[in-house]
Image (cartoon, rainbow, N blue to C red):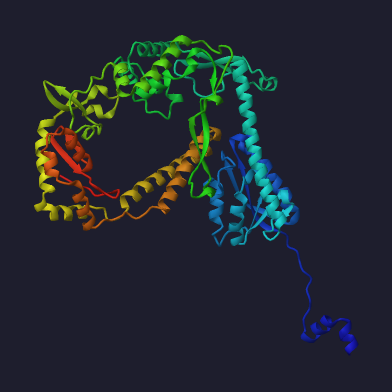
Amino acid sequence: MTAEISNDPWSTLDDILGLQAADPVDEGIGELAVYGRCSTEDNQDPETSRGWQFGNARKFVEPLGGRIVAEYFDIGQSRSVPWERRTEASRLLAELKNPRRTWNALVVGEGTRCWFGNQFSLIAPRFAAYGVELWVPELGGRFDPRNPSHKMLMSVLGGMSESERQHVQARVRAAMDAQVLNEGRHQGGRAPYGYVVVDGGPHPNPRKAAEGFRLRVLAIDEPAAEVVRRIFAEYLDGKGDRAIANGLNLDGIPCPSARRPEQNRHRLADGWQGSTTRSILENPRYTGYAIFGRWAKHETLLNPDDVGAGHVVRFRRAAPDRIVRSRQPAHPKIVSVEDFTQAQLMRRSRAAGGLRGIAKLERERPAAKHTYLLKGLVRCDICARRMQGAVIRKGIYYRCIARTMAPGSPVLADHPKTVNLREDVVIPPLNAWLCQVFDLDNRDETVAAMVGAQPGGSGTGRETVEKRLKAAEARLRRHQAAIEAGVDPAALVDAMNLAQAERQAAREELENLPESAMIDAAEVYAMLDSLGDVERALNSRNPDRITQVYRDLGLQVLYDNKKEAVVVTASPRVDNVCVRGGT
């Protein structure tokens, strides 16, 4: 008996217990979800990219018994964007929390397209926490979080993906620089005001020419070019940016966004502005030479305290060494090089001269001979613009003039030609009210009113952030609906990236929104003590002292022309906390 047990003890024990050992059955991987991504960097249509990525995933898992039951595919998303800010990837991450999901594993068609830098190390633990396996073709199988070789390989793949993107960017930029430098080629984008993009013949690349691509060049749009010449001529004659813009508006000349709305959908078409003339005066392409790289994309951290949140793209002026100019004229000139250079020298002189140089150049700014006690504090109730100080018949007024507004503005319907507010009508009752409010006998009532005027919480700020979040989500839904309706996804890449960045920023701001700081009566008493004798300061003959009191009190004056009433709001501050009250 002992011999029989020693030969096969487990078989003997199974017979005694009545157990029958079963051979393990391999049912395969089971049901999986698949994820892919296609961006504008891929230079191929989304359907083709989706097809080959999901095809690779099926070839990888189907021999192992895997069945793909859910698909997630991001279109127009750069690999540098974190998963939480990608539309489909964020939906996939949210589905991890769904206990009724039909899949328990995820496969990708190509790992370098899905993960960038250290993204995999941030994503993999979340899948492991919900019991979801990751199948990566570059690993040849399932990712094992306990295998240090797997972790090292995925880290290398992330670095390769980041390096590949940087090399592609560098090669493309170098090629475009060479094309501009040697050939003066137009590199796309909106044509400057005064030019139009026309057909320039077959594309110089034989392969692209065979596919029907055409070269695009700039040609003069003569009516707009005349406006450009007028802008430079008036500037060289001494007018400033805003003076030129006002003259163009008075003459009824359409602004760039009104003349060509199809390429300026992001503009309001509300008339010429000082910034519009400034951009024309500073654009060297009007000299006939091709200029490339004046503005460049810069990736900045969305949240410096959370590097994992990724970057957002912002356009900034490029450094001078990054700007390229063609060796020869590339298109017809509108302004001579001499006139353009003279205009730039005048702009530098104006910037170096400060306000005196600005006044000299504008020729519309008189030297300040009068002190405006409410300078910068008075606004028009109709248009919400600051009212400008002026002297009329030896009296000081604050004026809001309708002709300085852009033509077509909806506010013009209710705005008089001129809204005037006389200073000596406002100052006496204003000072009397302030002396009464901050009088020592009324200090207790003032403190109680100021403490009670504080908002009860951060509701106002939270409501504003929530509105921004809803607006960003609404824009994303509209863009997605447009893609489903047949709009080219490449045309919506920048708009979708911007909307996603705004949505993520609003979400993080909501999560980290602090509660409003409430101050007590003791802090208000301390603030009033720091103001000193308000009545004595207001009754002094020193205008600088009076204006300083107004600014310490945070005065804001709103003039209602229809009611001929002035609403004054005082916003004193204590340790950067604002307490509002007013009449």
Q: Nearer the viewer, residue 246 or 65?
A: 246
Q: x, y percentage for residue 41?
A: 61, 35
Q: Nearer the viewer, residue 40 or 567?
A: 567
In the shown orientation, is residue 490 left or right of residue 358?
A: right
Instruction: Say above or below: 225 vs 568.
Output: above
Q: x, y percentage for residue 165?
A: 63, 37
Q: Is residue 192 visible?
A: yes
In the shown orientation, is residue 259 left or right of residue 207?
A: left
Q: x, y percentage for residue 350?
A: 36, 20
Residue at the image point whose x is 26% and y is 56% from the top: 519
Q: Nearer the viewer, residue 576 or 23?
A: 576
Q: Is residue 43 visible?
A: no
Instruction: Say above or below: 401 vs 82.
Output: above
Quadrant holding the C terminus = top left
In the shown orientation, is residue 405 left or right of residue 4?
A: left
Residue at the image point whose x is 71% and y is 45% from the top: 56
Q: x, y percentage for residue 234?
A: 35, 12
Determine the residue located farthest toward the bottom in the rendered image.
1
Residue at the image point whose x is 83% and y is 81% from the top: 11
Instruction: Say above or below: 295 vs 223.
Output: below
What is the quadrant of residue 424 in the picture? top left
Quadrant holding the N terminus = bottom right
What is the quadrant of residue 252 in the picture? top left
Q: State the count of labels.
A: 0
In the shown orientation, is residue 5 left or right of residue 362?
A: right
